Amino acid sequence: MKTLQELQEIRDRMKSRVANRETADESDVRIVVGMATCGIAAGARPVLAAIGDEIESRKLTNVKVSQTGCIGICAYEPIVEVYVPNREKVTYVHMTPEKVGAVIARHIVNGSPVTEYTYSYAVANRGGNA
Amino acid sequence: MLERAHILVCGGTGCTSGNSKLIAEEFTRLLTENGLQNEVKLIMTGCFGLCAKGPIVVVYPEGAFYQHVKVENVAEIVSEHILKGRVVARLTNVEKDDDGANKSINETAFYKKQKRVVLRNCGIINPEDIDEYLAYDGYKAYEKAVTAMTQQEVIDCVKASGLRGRGGGGFSTGLKWQFARDSVADQKYVVCNADEGDPGAFMDRSLLEGDPHCVIEAMMIAGYAIGATKGYIYVRAEYPIAVERLNIAIAQARDYGILGDNAMGLGHAFDIELRLGAGAFVCGEETALLRSTEGKRGEPKQRPPFPAVKGLFEKPTLINNVETYGNITQIILNGPEWFAAMGTEKSKGTKVFALGGKIKNTGLVEIPMGTTLRTIIEEIGEGIPNGKRFKAAQTGGPSGGCIPAAYIDTKIDYDNLIALGSMMGSGGLIVMDEDNCMVDIAKFFLEFTVDESCGKCTPCRIGNKRLYEMLDKVTKGEATLEDLDKMEELCRYIKENSLCGLGQTAPNPVLSTLKYFRDEYVAHVRDRKCPAGVCKALISYKIIEDKCIGCGLCKRGCPVGAISGEIKKPHVIDPSKCIKCDACFAACKKNAISK
Ligand SMILES: Cc1cc2nc3c(=O)[nH]c(=O)nc-3n(C[C@H](O)[C@H](O)[C@H](O)COP(=O)(O)O)c2cc1C
């Protein structure tokens, strides 16, 4: 026998798990992970998994995660693009599962991109060899 | 862990017969082989609706809509789409938006004009997992009804919504609930009519297969409102997938304490049992259904008393159709005003139709009441195949009638269909083109009702049989014009005097075709011709000499050797051997055969 509260817990837990069965609408934040051969080889899969875990544990239902193919800057994989409605797209490069927490907390939840992980930052600060 | 992709494989009856189970197994195998089983979730859902394009697989979050999927395609979808994130465009719907990209599902012609209230979860959730139903606000409506509303308030809410029975009659659901509540008795019952006997109809089956919990929850709400503790779902045994999913759903609901002596801990008892019907059409009629549920022979009886007063085991019984129940949770959760804002003045909400016949997109559609027939046929259905002309649409199955092409702009609702001499029925919508003979259609439906008449009352048992014989004479060119008048008279007699709805409506297909296509009847009688070339006794196959190129295709196709001729010279058909099977007509590429 489940109590009303237990049923509600199941609803809450399941809601974030089924959330990606709707195609994103205008008001959703979209996170797109590059999952072409280059991305996967560079470690995109654990990044994607970490994003999923983070979204689930924070119960974020307005975030849609999807995958895309090769973005063309393979040297910077794994790449994660974040689309917040009415804002410029932000491209994160050389992503790792460890960096995911900061991106979700600072960018998705609090609205300020993690500049030091972005493509533009990487390009501006690249030494001779990137 | 949160899965990054969900693969939804249609497990409705249509796609299952197209091997969707094997497709799902192949996905499971390949996902495991690639170590993706924890990252990607595979779900068997209910019907997506677009059965013509089945088997269907949808992959989220992209919403890529794969159609006509074969087991061989699975490897490519896994390696390209799931592993590399590239949708296999070749296997998806071919509709493009202005930028040349594939349209997402909800933008395609088939789905765009639909409004999914009853079918909201079909093709989205796994019907065998109660947790997924809970994710979409499952069992919240029951909680709201019992904790925040009195029994009378629940009934008032259903009344105010304007919901009318979807099983055919169109009676006010709220009023029916009120009658059942007002009947005083120590025991009352809630019954769900899932007999769905109309040929060509599969709305109720699809809802039960795709979202069984929503019917269970609605029956619980009805039980609370009228004061019943026991429910029965009467479902035909020919619906094995629906039966299996209902059994699973009931077991899971019991396990969670949602069904039981103290449902959801809210102090009311409710439990549900299944009763399997043996597929008799008359058992869909409510009094016959209740007798059959009692274990007796399924024969109708006179009303009144209505079931709400004296029904199952002589106790007050609320009986509603599957789709009627399918609306209840949404009405409770969103309020009656939300529901009443959809539809026409006297027909609120949406209606699910099983779209079939001569139409490109056969399948299951849910539209707001008041949508025109033209929208359904030309937009959602994407028109008639092979460039043929639309002739008529048949609604209401064997109890209904046809709507001729001239009325294609009719707004579909209960009253407009009745005014045209047809009816909403349970929701079969069969599209006919110029190649359909209307006399033959009427004969088809009447043959069905003659077969299915239970035989208890004379007007139906004998009247319909005689009517059928007269129709048969028409199709053989043996009737007189006077017979047509006699048929009309007999129709009226049967309608007025039959015991139950089966007999009372059986002549409708005849009356309605006589009304709108009398010229076709006259052609059969007076000219001994079947204008559509269907009635065998009235057609003879001939080869048009000028057009025949002597290719021999017809000769090879003829199963009885009735065609002779030398290659590259006009062939001839021997009428004494011809069995009018149409094989030559279908084989000829030059339109050189007339009938
Ligand atoms: C011959 C005959 C067959 C019927 N078959 C069905 C059926 O298959 N399913 C159904 O829901 N109602 C069927 N009905 C209508 C039922 O008698 C009854 O009106 C309906 O279950 C009431 O539910 P509703 O008010 O929710 O529509 C049939 C009626 C007749 C006369």
Image: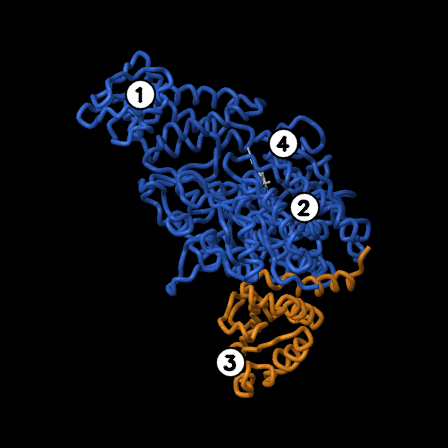
Q: Amino acid at mark 4?
A: Ala
* Closer mark to the observer between disc 1 and disc 2: 1
* Closer mark to the observer between disc 3 and disc 2: 3
Q: Are marks 4 and 3 on the same chain?
A: no
Q: Of residues B373 and B418, which is closer to you in this image?
A: B373
- To which chain does the residue with label 2 belong? B
Q: Quadrant of residue B540?
A: top left
Q: Earlier in the sequence, mark 1 or mark 2?
A: 2
- Residue B180 numbered tag: 2
Colour representing chain B: blue
- To which chain does the residue with label 3 belong? A
* Closer mark to the observer between disc 1 and disc 3: 1
Near mark 4 (Cα within 10 A), the count class, few <14, some 14-19 or many ≥20, is: many
Q: Which residue is mark 3?
A: A87
Q: Amino acid at mark 1?
A: Lys
**Position of A60 relative to B20 (above/below):** below
Q: Of residues B56 and B277, which is closer to you in this image?
A: B56
Near mark 1 (Cα within 10 A), the count class, few <14, some 14-19 or many ≥20, is: many
Image location of residue B75, percent across then percent down: 56, 50
Residue under the point 25% across and 31% down: B590
Q: Helix or strand or loop: what does disc 2 sit on?
A: helix
Q: Which residue is mark 1?
A: B555
Q: Earlier in the sequence, mark 4 or mark 1?
A: 4
